[in-house]
Amino acid sequence: MNSCNPPNFDMVDGVLRRIGAAGGAPEAHGSLCGLACFLGAQAGRVWVAGLASPGAGLPPAAGGDAGVLGDLALVTVDALSQGDMSFSPLLPPDDRPLSLRTAGLADWCAGFMHGLGEAAGHRSAQEALGGDITQEVMADFGEIARVTLDDEETDLEAETAYTELVEFVRVSVQLVFEELHTVRENLSSASVH
């Protein structure tokens, strides 16, 4: 397991604002996870390179903003690779308003679908999107990406629903990662040759 601690939500969100990234921490982390399902350890490099706004760029050094994003990528891919369900999506902390956390979860799911689609540009990866688990998760995440708070729910009901959705997303991403294991191996061996 990777020994580095994951950067927290505010740290990542601040880095993304400084480099002019199009989305916030939830969407960016979702995209990283989608890429990781296909690219494994190579996802971090691709993800960091695609985050900065044109002309802003990120320094290749391991420190600073690039280091924060690199650490997040390492910890995330490591958690998914462990297969022990230690993976968690990077979402606004529980002390933030539920509306912000719900919007963050919707953005996270949209980012995941974008990252998965971006990585599926390879022919073998495109075929893998036909897997039952991946197809079901993509359909479910499409719905979650449009989720809003229900005004008729009590605070407790809304919190419970949010918690259940986060758990569903966490487990679903792990299942997609496992389903695409062979695709990652094939892409990795193809890039070595």
Image: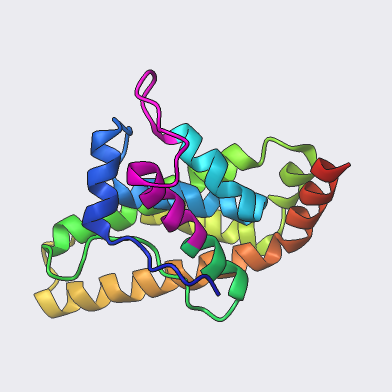
- Residue displayed at 47% across by 47% down: 31
**Camera sees residue 21:** yes
Q: Position of residue 180 (x, y in %)?
A: 70, 59
**Camera sees residue 154:** no
Q: How does the figure colour the protein chain or chains? A: rainbow
Q: Residue furthest right?
A: 193
Is residue 64 magenta-colored? yes
Q: Is residue 182 above or below residue 51?
A: below
Is residue 116 magenta-colored? no
- What's the magenta region? 51-74
Please state which of residues 147 and 26 is positioned toward the viewer in this rendering.
26
Q: Quadrant of residue 57?
A: top left
Q: Quadrant of the N terminus?
A: bottom right
Q: Quadrant of the C terminus?
A: top right
Q: Is residue 174 left or right of residue 17?
A: right
Q: Position of residue 16 (x, y in %)?
A: 29, 40
Q: Is residue 60 above or below residue 132?
A: above
Q: Is residue 127 left or right of residue 153?
A: right
Please state which of residues 85 and 153 is positioned toward the viewer in this rendering.
85
Q: Is residue 40 above or below residue 57?
A: below
Please state which of residues 19 and 61 is positioned toward the viewer in this rendering.
61
Q: Position of residue 63 (x, y in %)?
A: 38, 47
Q: Is residue 6 left or right of residue 137?
A: left
Please state which of residues 170 and 78 is positioned toward the viewer in this rendering.
78
Q: Position of residue 118 (x, y in %)?
A: 58, 37
**Number of numbered discs:** 0
- Residue displayed at 61% across by 69% down: 81
- Residue displayed at 43% across by 56% down: 71
- Residue displayed at 51% across by 59% down: 74
